Image: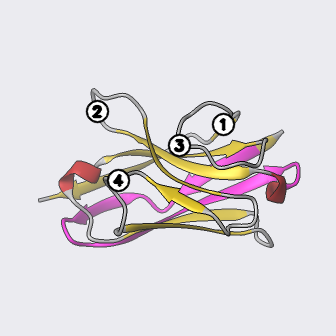
Amino acid sequence: QVQLVESGGGLVQAGDSLRLSCAASGRAFSWYAMGWFRQAPGKEREFVAATSVSGARTVYADSVKGRFTISRDNAKNTVYLQMNSLKPDDTAVYFCAARPSGSVSYGEVGYDYWGQGTQVTVSS
């Protein structure tokens, strides 16, 4: 089992940047593929980005491609989401999740462990 704690959220203006962090504890972090998801008010949770066990492969939702970057530091048991050129539509609670299979996935299937989330609010 792995425990996940997100941090780095906040209130920013459109065009600003934020970097979210997700610290993992428990079983070997480097065994898991990691993903970021988000849920806006009144909407279903949606996929944002994911990275493979080594970090060599990354995938993104079309809505964030070119603006967001997912990365991981297995020595620090941490995965990051660098968010640039933020838009009001990016306002949501952001969750990190761990996938024991180790393979990258666009959907929620296989992500067995979730953090509590961190709020990101982008004002216009």
Which amino acid type is marked by label 1? Tyr
State the separation of the CA atoms marked 2 and 3.
21 Å
**Callout 4 secondary element:** loop
State the separation of the CA atoms marked 4 and 1.
20 Å
State the separation of the CA atoms marked 4 and 2.
20 Å
Disc 4 target residue: 62
Part of the protein shown in magenta: 3-28
Q: How many marks?
A: 4
For the residue pair 113 and 100, the one nearer the viewer reads as 100
Residue 103 position in % (x across, y down): 71, 48
Instruction: Kindly indicate whether the residue at mark 3 contacts the one at mark 2 (C-beta within 8 angstroms).
Output: no
Residue 14 position in % (x across, y down): 18, 65
**Callout 2 secondary element:** loop
Which is more N-terminal, label 2 or label 1? Answer: 2
Q: Name the mark nearer the viewer: 3 or 1.
A: 3
Measuring 75% from the left and 66% from the top, which residue is drawn there? Answer: 54
Q: Name the mark nearer the viewer: 4 or 2.
A: 4
For the residue pair 86 and 48, the one nearer the viewer reads as 48
* Pointer 1 local density, CA inside 10 Å: few below 14, some 14–19, many at least 20: many
Residue found at the very far right of the displayed protein: 27
Instruction: Kindly indicate whether the residue at mark 1 contacts the one at mark 4 (C-beta within 8 angstroms).
Output: no
Disc 2 target residue: 41
**Callout 3 secondary element:** loop
Which amino acid type is marked by label 3? Tyr
Which is more N-terminal, label 2 or label 4? Answer: 2
Disc 3 target residue: 106
- The type of colouring in the image is secondary structure
Which amino acid type is marked by label 2? Pro
Q: Name the mark nearer the viewer: 1 or 2.
A: 1
Residue 31 position in % (x across, y down): 83, 53
